[in-house]
Image (cartoon, coloured by chain):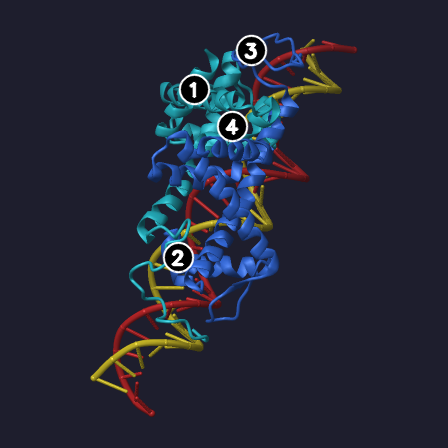
Chain colours: A cyan, B blue, C red, D yellow
DNA sequence: CATTATTGTTTGCCAAGGCTAAACTATTTG
DNA sequence: CAAATAGTTTAGCCTTGGCAAACAATAATG
């Protein structure tokens, strides 16, 4: 360290306790780890959820539809489908439209439910529909069960 | 399979309340794009925010601290710092501790503020502190200004 | 002040998730 | 039923963000 910081990095106790001090290292680390982990599954869940929705609302899920709804190239979708296959989430034969395995179906259901809870919560809060949809899409993967339950309760309260 | 889907995606002018049919393709695509874009800046913001916090609470930001708080290797931090440098967000000399450029400082401030709003909102909602911290960390990058304002208002209401 | 410990950097590797271009398959239609 | 069109997959490339291990600089200590 070039400049004279009092007592370097030690100070094992956090001296300052302002509004929001830094959390202890391990806790802080766990927060970031949780986020990183969420990111790994996020995309997978988005694909599976979308496939589920397409199957539900359209009767079939085709690569081209996924591509245009995700705003992604078909090549990307194709590659992703292979991954989903390997993960045992979808069942597909080349050049045919796809289906979810029971595991995939379960994931799609869970995702859809979470998504719905977050979306309706935002609407209940007073967020405009368009914004609520966008925010929900991003937020849904980062909302814990605890928070989800509270959101659900809030929405129900508001509704009645 | 032929499947004669009436390809009209039924431009629902007023999106359904609860049933939640598929949104029109372009809107759907925009949602995913927004999320993808958020992901690109997310990590950057997290690093910058953390560096800002370390500078604020500790007087300096060292690679080792960042690494342990992010639960990431020092190599990763080092690489990231180079990127932040290129992006003009931090100023650093090799083997010295780092500083934020004005731009970086602005980003850190904005991040911290957003983070705080989301965190306090979750607490006001009744979410436990530990969970609130984790969720806030993940959610903060996906909350629009519109929603943020509403969260702020809600928290203020609750507080008084 | 020489040595050791700590911290920071570089190098080389990997996987994920994008892309385009080109090849291949299926479906529709003339 | 063959040709055209639409849809899918493959190949090859790029960027990010991880890692471990080797190396370099700085700080701490005997």
Check disc 2 and report the residue beneath it: B67
Crowding near pointer 2: few (<14 within 10 Å), some, many (20+)? some
| Spatial CA span between label 4 and label 3 | 34 Å
Chain to which mark 2 belongs: B
Q: Find out whether the residues at labels 3 and 2 contact each other: C-beta distance under 8 Å.
A: no
Q: Position of residue A67 (x, y in %)?
A: 59, 27
Nearer mark to the viewer, of 1 and 3? 1
Q: Which chain contains the residue that carries disc 3? A: B
Residues B1 and C8: in front is: C8
Front disc: 4 or 3: 4
Q: Residue at x 42, y 33 (%)?
A: B124
Same subunit, tags 4 and 2: no
Q: Are marks 4 and 3 in contact (CB under 8 Å)?
A: no
For label 3, count other residues whose C-alpha is less than 10 Å away and answer few (under 14), some (14-19) or many (20+).
Answer: few
- Percent across and percent down for residue B40 are 55, 44
Report the disc number at residue B1. 3
Report how far apart the C-alphas of labels 3 and 2 lie in the structure: 53 Å
Disc number placed over residue B66 in the picture, else none: none
Q: Are marks 4 and 3 on the same chain?
A: no
> Could you tell me residue B94's position as x and y percent?
49, 71
Where on the picture, by quarter, is residue B126?
Answer: top left
Q: Tell me, yes or no, if residue A142 can be seen here.
A: no
- Residue holding disc 4: A136
Quote the CA–CA distance across marks 1 and 3: 30 Å
How far apart are the alpha carbons under marks 4 and 2? Answer: 31 Å
Which chain does the residue under circle 4 lie in? A
Q: Nearer the viewer, residue A132 or A156?
A: A156
**Category of crowding for the residue at label 4, using alpha-carbon neighbours closer than 10 angstroms: few (below 14), some (14–19), many (at least 20):** many
| Discs 3/2, front | 2
Instruction: Tell whether label 4 touches label 1 (CB within 8 Å).
Output: no
Q: Left or right: A128 with respect to D26?
A: right
């Amino acid at each position: 360290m070039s400049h004279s910081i009092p007592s370097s990095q030690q100070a094992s106790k956090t001296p300052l306790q302002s509004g929001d001090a830094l959390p202890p290292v391990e806790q802080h680390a766990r927060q970031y780890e949780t986020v990183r982990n969420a990111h790994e599954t996020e995309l997978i869940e988005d694909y599976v959820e979308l496939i589920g929705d397409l199957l539900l609302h359209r009767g079939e899920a085709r690569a081209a539809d996924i591509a245009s709804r995700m705003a992604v190239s078909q090549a990307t979708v194709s590659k992703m489908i292979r991954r989903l296959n390997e993960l045992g989430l979808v069942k597909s034969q080349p050049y045919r439209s796809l289906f979810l395995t029971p595991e995939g179906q379960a994931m799609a259901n869970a995702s859809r439910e979470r998504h719905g809870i977050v979306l309706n919560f935002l609407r209940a809060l007073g967020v405009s529909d368009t914004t609520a949809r966008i925010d929900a899409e991003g937020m849904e993967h980062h909302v814990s069960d605890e928070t989800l339950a509270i959101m659900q309760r809030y929405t129900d309260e508001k509704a009645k």
